[in-house]
Image: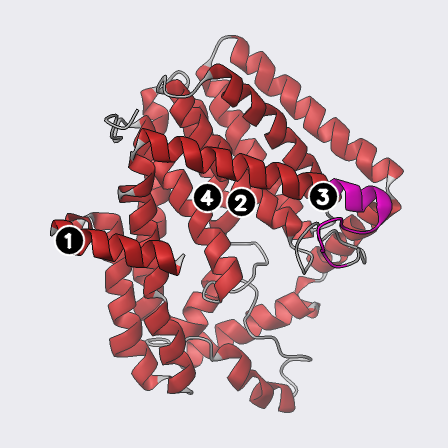
Amino acid sequence: MVLIALLFLVRSAVHRDWSWVRQSDIAILLVIWLIMNLLVSPFAEFSGKSFGRSASWLRFVVFYAAVTRWILVDQKAVRWVLIAFMTTVAVAAADAFYQFLAGYSLLGGQPMTGRLTGPLDRPNIGIYLAKTGFATVTLALALYLSDMMKQNAFRIGLVVFPFALMIVFLSGERTASVLSLLAIGCSLVGLFLVGGKSRLAAAGIAVFVFGGIGALLTISDRILARVMALGDVVSDYSGSIYGELTSLGWRLFTENPIVGTGMGNFGLVCPEYQARGLISECHPHPHNFYVEWLSDTGLLGTLPWLVFVGMIVWAGLRHFRNGHSQSLVAGLYLGTMVLSLFPLAATQSAFSNWPAIMAWNSIAVAVAALRLSQGKVDKSAA
């Protein structure tokens, strides 16, 4: 991610092309970065920690700009990225499936203990496949509809994607499974709006998905136990650790509503509240993107972030107006956004390295796919 960002900056300097800085979605992200460094971190509870997070956050902004305005605006680059993503997803999903059957990974992942890890060193294979898979299939469809992708390659993607989704549900990751269902729902709405036989296809896929989940719950005690655990958390959310973390995050925001406590400071100030009996255990973050934005950056950081989210979501909703097959692109695009931006999900940190990388990669690829569907692509390299 850093390498891509640095290369994009070098390219911009060499060509003296900084026009991307003025484009609305990127400009608002740069404003957020300035706010973090000039107004949030100087007043943080632990300013050193906050500056470490706020200064380095720029890598996500420049990476997003590079993917959407440089890399994935070239046909040849889009094709190579699709090949890389499809291959990676297929290998990761195959390894996770083997782990589901045999109990261990062939590629060095951690042993399965309730949740699959696949080739990863922690049980996050489900959310990895969901975010990467939905973004990839959105980009593939956009390229295919632009008559720039071979039919055979697209068919391979149609095989890999359902297989990856199956692994998401087999993984035992509750958040990944629920968010994937929401993403599938968005995609089916888009397919339904295509009209004609696509409506029957949407209904058939919905029946197949829910029938498959029902069968999985019937034959797998492990998955059923995960679903029951999710039910327990939802039924008594305020009494769960997730509810406690969310409550503390909100409390930190109300005590510092303008600038928050500082980026990455949640875990550092938490022990004080634990000692007062306000939370049973501390974590580095409140496990919700939006609560973390509020607690760490206050209104000054959160409000412009919500503007950015509104802009990219609205772009997907507007794309439905283009009708026909573009409705499916819009549905897949919004499904991809749901995986990273759904406000009620229990998530990893919005600012720490690996979860933020997954989120920004997924968002950036989806935005690039939407721009491709709108005709914003360089065909000279075809």
Disc 2 element: helix
Is residue 70 rendered to the left or right of residue 309? left
Q: Quadrant of residue 31?
A: bottom left
The residue carrying mark 4 is 337
Closest to the observer: 194 or 167? 167
Disc 3 element: helix
Which numbered dot is residue 86?
A: none
Closest to the observer: 108 or 68? 108
* Disc 4/disc 3 C-alpha distance (Å): 26 Å
The residue carrying mark 1 is 14
In magenta segment, residue 159: no
Q: Indicate which label's residue lies in the foreground, 4 or 3.
A: 3
Which numbered dot is residue 131?
A: 2
Give the amino acid type for the residue marked by disc 3 in the picture. Asp
Q: Indicate which label's residue lies in the foreground, 1 or 2.
A: 1
* Residue 191 x/y as whole percent: 50, 21
